[in-house]
Image (cartoon, grey):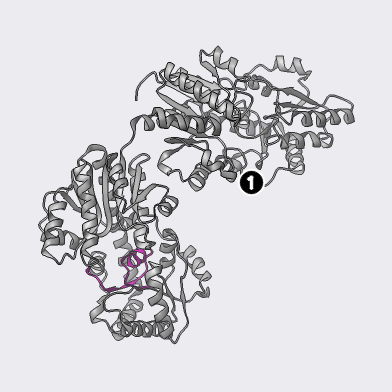
Amino acid sequence: MKKNLNILLALMQLDIGGAETHVVELAKELKRKGHNPIVTSNGGVYVKELEENGIKHYRVPLQNKNPKNMIRSAKLLKRIITDENIDIVHSHARIPSFILGKLHKRMGFPFVTTAHWVFTTRFGLKYITDWGEKTVAVSEDIKTYLMDNYGVPESDIRVTINGIDTHKFSPDTDAADIRAEFGLSEDDTVIVYVSRMDESRSLVAKQLISIVPEIKDPKLKVLVVGDGDDFANVKAAADDVNKRLGRDCVLLAGARTDINKLVAPADLFVGVSRAALEAMAAEKPVIIAGNEGYIGLFDESKLGVGIDTNFCCRGCEESSPELLLKDINRFLALPDEERGKLAVYGRELIKQEYSVSRMAEDSLKVYEWALGKQDEILISGYYGFKNSGDDALLLAITNDLKRNIESPNIVVLSSNPKETMQRYRVKAVNRLNPIKIVKHMKKAGMLISGGGTLIQDSTSTQSLIYYLTVIRSAVKHGVKVMLYSNGIGPLNGKTNVHRSKKTLDKVDLITLRDPAALNALREIGVTRPQTVVTADPVFGMAKADRAGGREILRRFGVPDDGGRVLGVSVRRARDTDSGFETAIARVCDYAAERYGCHTVFIPMQPTRDEGISRSIMSKMKTKASLVNTRLDVNDMISVVAAADLCLGMRLHSLIYATCGNVPLIGLAYDPKIRSFMDYAGQELCLGIEDMSDEAIKGMIDHCFDNYDKIKERLAESYELLKSKAEMNGRLAAELYEKGSVTVEH
């Protein structure tokens, strides 16, 4: 990345507030790291601090949505970006981001934003929000908010921290001037509260003031720091309490920038977000409370919820005077040694996890992403058709890429781009829109074709031509191509064999999900690309949750009585006539009567599988259940894992069973079923054309007679297949980053 970047940091204003302090500290640290930050805002108390540190500030009316101000701001920002030769623009609020987003589209400068808070999306406000090319989120919950509400891909977001200057906020800060200014003696018990006094931020300030008369400490002093549109109400409350007590107990500091000095005399700090972290850095015990909720007196037990909410209490219980009073009295009753432990823990946490340097490095990493225009990774497959097996493949592939490539820029070709973006946190385009596909080909560094069995014509020649055309387009545009854990075949027509060989010989890397696929590839004459047998990507995912699966099944009427469960996954195929349905119904009844199994039908693609499942259920004598709601991939894996035996036609029902260590019987309507069963070392497989209920009953008997041995072999197979599956992601990363791979056979 270029050194000495000219970086424009834009925000609404520079008065007291967490986002404002974040920008000031970021600008100072970027300056220390040799870059040239320039700040634009409507001004405020922190302008002086910026200028004292040699950081230029431009006053731009970015503080509201007034149309005249927005037009004027756009003109000023355009001039600043040009005159200052800005390399990258970093916006920190909704209004600046909206204006700069419009300028970005015209001027083409790299544009990133930071999300410090969650905004309402009502009244069309969602559509005037621009999150830039890359986004920094100050907490995990804000990252989730961006993905859920704005569809920002996960790869475009980096989570940072509110970095704190631990030299500025230190237990060594001299408090003498502040004590003198506010008449605080060394014997006073001092509680300090810092926040903007806007109506949206001042709830806890007023709650704290209201309980002062109930805190039985004659030497109590409460110092409230901040200003805003609710300051008059805060002052009225403070004046009322002081009048009732007959002394100045609540002291108002107003808007200040010397927060480190104001915190220095505190015995206890109350507040949220950055202000709370600064107090911890100053080695002060902290009660975390704000308009968003209440965490309470902070110790190690509160760390998880603190991190998850960026110490803002979003989603926590509401703050109340009762909660505050209880925790303040609890703190005041602690011996000095325990108070000291709380203080030291907070400072050590800030030093280790919340440094200004790390915050700046996170932003610089995002600048590098934006400046580098990271090449996209296109994924082509049977995606967006609500098929659990293909859903699982896409999830597994994207997870593989995220594990092996930092923030991969993934774009999926999908029949339902909107749903794909929402479910998988990636970009997606319509798989049948050639203009958009070519547009992304021009920005791509790699195409992944797969997983699944895409190179076959048993579905249709049209399907085969589609996938080959996507591959040929990638080759034409100089994009690296990888077939990702594919099955191959069957290919029945000579023309299809020829066109497949011609196309596949031009790709860069082929990984295959089983040895049968390698044999099929060699039969059609493909020999040029690097080729290796791995395993289905789904084996690389987390192991199934059997207990969670049982809980889900209970919702669909499966008895929670500890009895056995037979999971059945069927689909329509050439030989699944009424005779097939009757045979399966008899098998399910046999499992119920002989082994006490409750049958649950698990449609892997509900639109195609639910009909035949219901038809079989109608032919059964015993009661059965149906999973009649589309579940996400992890829940489906867990549901199959909750069975004691799996009877599967769908390939991924058998893969899920293997992941869950569930004995399985394969119904081979397609060669890929038998290929998988062979690769997994499982013998119980029957071709649909040769199937009879008596044959399957015999396999069920064999399963239960040899149950423990089968599970032992399954566990061994799973570990081997998982290891092989993990190769896919490593090889993909190597191809993407180096342009070639070395495959060891």
Question: Quick check: 657 above or below 133?
Answer: below
In depth, the one of 461 and 79 nearer the eye is 79
Asked if residue 664 lies in the magenta stretch, the reply is: yes
Specify the amino acid type for callout 1: Cys
| Left or right: 515 in relation to 247 | left
Q: Residue at x 52, y 74 (%)?
A: 557
Q: Which residues are magenta?
A: 646-671
Do we see residue 543 in this rendering?
Answer: yes
Is disc 1 surrounded by few (<14), some (14 to 19) or many (20+) residues within 10 Å? some
The vertical placement of 631 against 79, above or below, is: below
Image-based side of 130 in relation to 327, left or right:
left
Which residue matches tag 1?
316
At a point 20% along the width and 63% down the height, the residue shown is 461
Which quadrant does the N terminus fall into? top left
Report x, y in % for residue 88. 42, 25
In the rendered structure, the answer to whether residue 68 lies left or right of residue 486 reads: right
Q: Residue at x 30, y 55 (%)?
A: 381
Residue 178's x, y, as percent? Answer: 72, 17
Q: Can residue 512 be seen in the rendering of this structure?
A: no
Is 433 located above or below residue 285 in the figure? below
Please tell me which residue lies in front, 410 or 583.
410
> Left or right of 744: which side holds 154?
right
- Residue closer to the observer: 45 or 442: 442
Q: Position of residue 11 (x, y in %)?
A: 55, 27
Image point 82% across, 30% down: which residue? 236
Q: Quadrant of residue 585?
A: bottom left
Q: In this figure, what is the number of numbered marks?
A: 1
Q: Is residue 523 magenta?
A: no
Q: Secondary structure at mark 1?
A: loop
